[in-house]
Amino acid sequence: LPALLAARAAHPHAQVVAGCTDVGLWITKLHKQYAQILDVTRVAALRTVVTTPQHIHIGAAVTLTDAFAALTAQWPQLHRFATRFAGLPVRNSGTLGGNVANGSPIGDSMPLLIALGANVVLMSVRGHREMPLEQLYTGYRKNVMAPDEVLAWIKVPLPLEGEMLKAYKISKRYDDDISAVCLVVNMTVTDGKVAAVSIGAGGVAATPVRATQAEAALRGNAWTPAAAQAAAAALRTQFQPISDMRASAAYRSEVLGNLVQRYWLESQG
């Protein structure tokens, strides 16, 4: 890790890679050329998963397969969502840190990590800093990382008693496809009221985002069909998705709200 940070400081314009599941396509399809490459998968420390009493620490170079294995060990309901993330070869070569650092608005891991309250740890020879994952992004595929920084760790808090986590991926094909909309809801209901809630969304903005308005509409209120409808309306108000080859803006907006209704139904058994 110190060698990587020293190399990053010495070569701030080098392209950082991990599994090359996206950068590889930039080269083969877009014909980009890179004079220098820094491969974080050569750093043993970043290929580990460490569980403490409070967090799961996932190194940036941990494969998607191993990262999701660590997450599904704590949240078994994520198994199907994990197996729908790309295809087996991509999950075995792509990394969680690469997916997060890439910052695609349709990357499925970020809405999940946002809903789980994950932080990212950025490191450089100057030291390290930590922030909530959703604060990493400043625009479409843009982030706050300095030229000499690398994304080193993703810290995920362990599940709390009573929380209800559901992850929804909407795509044209059920398997091996890119999401049109991804919504992940993590809620704790105590005595019929929403005690805590965090919602991550993908495919609805220029970056992966936290649905702060929907969270505000739910937090502290009774968990009722009316509350679900209010959260759905807040989601549609906060986000103005675009139309592209995967879905129209109207479809994305409609589905976004409908998924909260689905979460309500599933929470009732």
Image (cartoon, rainbow, N blue to C red):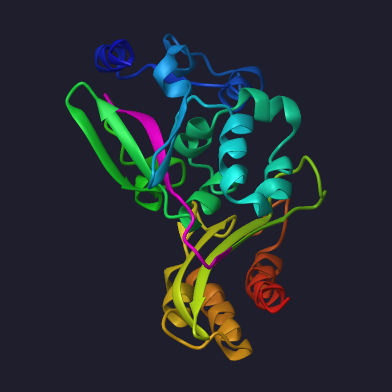
Q: Is residue 265 left or right of residue 233?
A: right
In the rendering, at what x and y percent does residue 146 appear? 27, 32
Q: Is residue 50 above or below residue 177?
A: above
| Residue 152 counted in the magenta span | yes
Does any portion of residue 107 appear in the rendered image? no
Q: Is residue 8 above or below residue 225?
A: above
Q: Residue at x 60, y 30 (%)?
A: 66
- Viewer-nearest residue: 169 or 240: 169
What are the residue bounds of the magenta stretch? Answer: 148-164
- Viewer-nearest residue: 177 or 85: 85
- Viewer-nearest residue: 98 or 142: 98
In the rendering, at what x and y percent does residue 235 appear? 54, 73
Quarter-of-image position of residue 73: top right
In the rendering, at what x and y percent does residue 67 appear? 56, 35
Quadrant containing the C terminus is bottom right
Q: Residue at x 25, y 17 (%)?
A: 9
In the rendering, at what x and y percent does residue 85 appear? 69, 41
Does any portion of residue 151 appear in the rendered image? yes
Q: Is residue 250 above or below residue 179?
A: below
Q: Residue at x 59, y 48 (%)?
A: 106
| Residue 191 counted in the magenta span | no
Q: Is residue 249 above or below residue 138?
A: below
Q: Is residue 124 left or right of residue 56?
A: left
Quadrant containing the N terminus is top left
Task: Return the residue found at the far left.
Answer: 126
- Viewer-nearest residue: 228 or 75: 75
Quarter-of-image position of residue 91: top right
